[in-house]
Image (cartoon, rainbow, N blue to C red):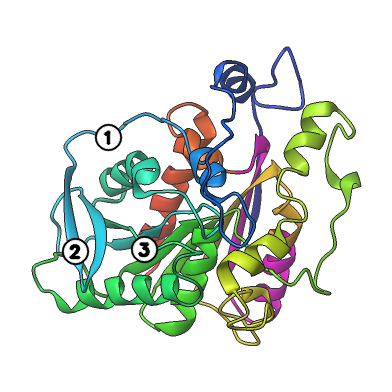
Amino acid sequence: MHETVNYTPSAQDPWFEAALVEYRAHRPPPTTGNPYTVLGEPVGDLRDNMGCRNRDLSAGVRVWSTVLDGVPARCCQGREDPAGPCVFFIHGGGFVGGSVQVMENPCKYLAQAAGGLVVNIDYRLAPETPFPGSIEDCVRAVRAVLRDEGFVFDRRRVFVAGDSAGANLALACAQKLEVFAGAVLYYPVVDLACGEHWHWDETVYRGWPDEMVRRCATGLKNNEPMLQKLYLQGRTSPRDPLASPIYRQAPFCPLLIQYAEYDYLRLQAEAFARRSAAMGTEVDTVLYQGLNHAFLDLFGIVPQAKASVDRMAAFLRQHKA
């Protein structure tokens, strides 16, 4: 099933959500000059400019830090319900950045909306930890929770979710562990090889070549070589399904894919959805018009971010292993 979500057009740029344009007009400018570089890439600057402050819309959610088989995590518990779900959330950031802090408010609200446990995994980052270290961290965290009876949830209602590169890692976990009732993917990175299953086409973007349309739609364009260098580091092929899940030749668990209209990753996400469905996967897709990449970071700032978490909670209610 596919759904397209409309938006409130901005008076300044009618192709975009008004709240997004307002936020972008007042956000701090990007920073430069961090001296930390790895393999010739400005990792320090990349990390410094990821994420933003968002808003806590939850109430009555218990939050604590823990370590799961050596992997740090932040846990968010709505009501402690043995019939409730457990969601493992994996943050994005191009495999090299991002943080559990940026995703804490969406995770807290999800725990409240779904009435269950959300485990926000603080995995090790590339390039210091290359492929498959981040995947191994996430798998260890999942296994640690599943074997610990102190965590209260329905073991038939275990899900994995993530945004951008975190969605890529979520799909890797879904290939390594057959325990998930479903996976929720926000604007996923699914093809580090830029292969034959999709191609980028500016004509799909309404308003092209409007300046903001062009800037948002191309913001991540041609980043694949850098991700190969910093994340894969020659340890596997870019066509390895654990690195590029679009090349998997078997179905996944049920998927909910939520993505933005003005995002370079839009076309590969749509191609991945079509290919997964053809392989026999149950796939639901939601396209959010008027938004760009990483809109979940703007939780409590753009209304669609909260709406997307409500859709995720509804997806959790509909599925059991």
Label 1 residue SS: loop
The disc at residue 58 is 1
Label 3 residue SS: loop
Which residue is painted at 83% across and 41% down in the image? 205
The disc at residue 311 is none
Label located before the other in sequence (1 or 3): 1
Tell me if mark 2 has few (under 14), some (14-19) or many (20+) residues whose alpha carbon lies within 10 angstroms of its own. Answer: few
x and y, in percent, of residue 240 in the image: 63, 83
Relative placement, left or right, of 85 versus 93 is: left
Number of the front mark, 1 or 3: 3
The residue wearing badge 3 is 123
x and y, in percent, of residue 176 in the image: 44, 83
Residue 190 visible in this rendered orientation of the protein: no
Amino acid identity at mark 1: Ser
x and y, in percent, of residue 278 in the image: 71, 78
Image quadrant containing the C terminus: bottom left
The disc at residue 67 is 2
Marks 2 and 3, how far apart at CA: 11 Å
In front: 169, or 28? 28
Relative placement, left or right, of 92 versus 54 is: right
| Residue 282 within the magenta-colored segment of the rendering | yes
Give the magenta-colored segment's residue range. 270-293
In this rendering, the answer to whether 1 lies above or below 28 is: below
Relative placement, left or right, of 234 versus 73 is: right
Amino acid identity at mark 3: Tyr
Marks 1 and 2, how far apart at CA: 24 Å
Relative placement, left or right, of 88 versus 44 is: left
